[in-house]
Image (cartoon, grey):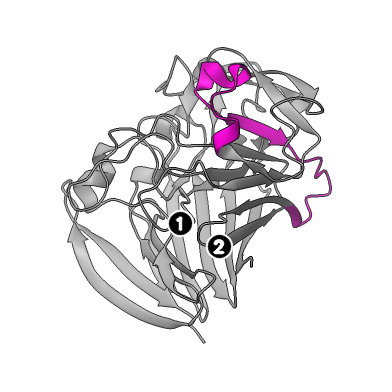
Amino acid sequence: MVRFTVLDPWQDPRGGEIERVRLDNGILALEVLSLGGIIRSLWAPDRHGERANIVLGAEDAAAYLEQQAHLGAIAGRYANRIAGGKLSHQGKNIQLDTNLAGNCLHGGFEGFNRRRWQLGMLSDGVRLTLVSPNGDGGFPGECRVQLDYRLAGHNLYVEMQAVTDSACPVSLTQHSYFNLEGSKATNAEHRIQILADKVLTLDETGIPNGIRDVTESVFDLRQPQRLGDHLSHEALAATKGYDHPFWLDNDAADLKKCAVLSSPVSGRRMTLYSNQPTVQLYCANFLGGTPGRAGQSYRDYQAVCLEPQLAPDAPNQPDLGRGWLQAGEVYHHISRYRFDCTD
């Protein structure tokens, strides 16, 4: 049984109110905002059964609107990067917002993370909906999005669907920053495992320019690795650590185990299952200075993001898989986050 608590709304500095709701099934609990579809807090038990918040969040609406880290938000209309913000479809050239190194990142300056979603209740969670108009961030067509957060035992399900009235790239991801120690410690003691044989290689701005086998490289995370042993590796110098899309070979789009994040300090373990073809591992390499809670700022390497999604720049690189959603088609993303503990 999921218990719901409606929390006092926040005032949006731009006008209007931001709704807040807490869900609790006795094992997991989370606070969800109508701003950005944000998961502000997620409480999970450690090996002693003590619950603590394990995601980074901000103090108020102003702090969320000030930062560019997408703390806990839904990234869209297209997660990750599109090269030069440029698209071409049926002979028509399209220019998107460019907001990082000349590329379009996470939908541009006014992505889904900054929008107020409509929030409603489900029996086991919440449903948020958003209408993104034609031309939003430069993207063609009206896009209608449905986002469900549901709790079931030790599991958090994140399910997203979208439809458009004309062809448009659509790829959404949940962008929570996890610290399984529930503290302000770095991510150094976290163990990461990604069940991928391949990783996309990137140019200097984060655009894919190839694909390589992970064997005998710092990208071979098929067995659990301590993050602190790898983040300063010379192969990761350009990105100050991991900020790379791993290729999951999930052509059937099944709900497939793809990554495990754990902490021997707290005993918490998060296992990620998804139907998406890639997962971006980002270790908060550029988080420093982002406003957090109680007037504090976050530091680099304070958390870990695991972002299931379509491949970056896939709308321009068909070899990387589907990137365009055609009118009348349904985009479907489902991910399952299972939380348990190790001894």
Residue 164 is inside the magenta segment? no
Rendering quarter of residue 93: top right
Secondary structure of residue under mark 1: loop
Whether residue 274 sits left or right of residue 114 in the image: it is right
Disc number at residue 268?
2
Q: Amino acid at mark 2?
A: Arg
- Give how far across and how far down residue 283 sits, in percent: 51, 37
Residue 241 is inside the magenta segment? yes
User: At 56% across and 54% down in the image, what residue appears?
Assistant: 263
Q: CA distance from mark 2 to mark 1?
A: 8 Å
- Give how far across and how far down residue 88 sits, in percent: 62, 19
Q: Residue furthest bottom?
A: 1
The reply to whether callout 2 and callout 1 are in contact (CB within 8 Å) is yes
Crowding at label 2, few (<14), some or many (≥20) Cα neighbours within 10 Å? many
Whether residue 281 sits left or right of residue 193 in the image: it is left
Q: Is residue 259 visible?
A: yes
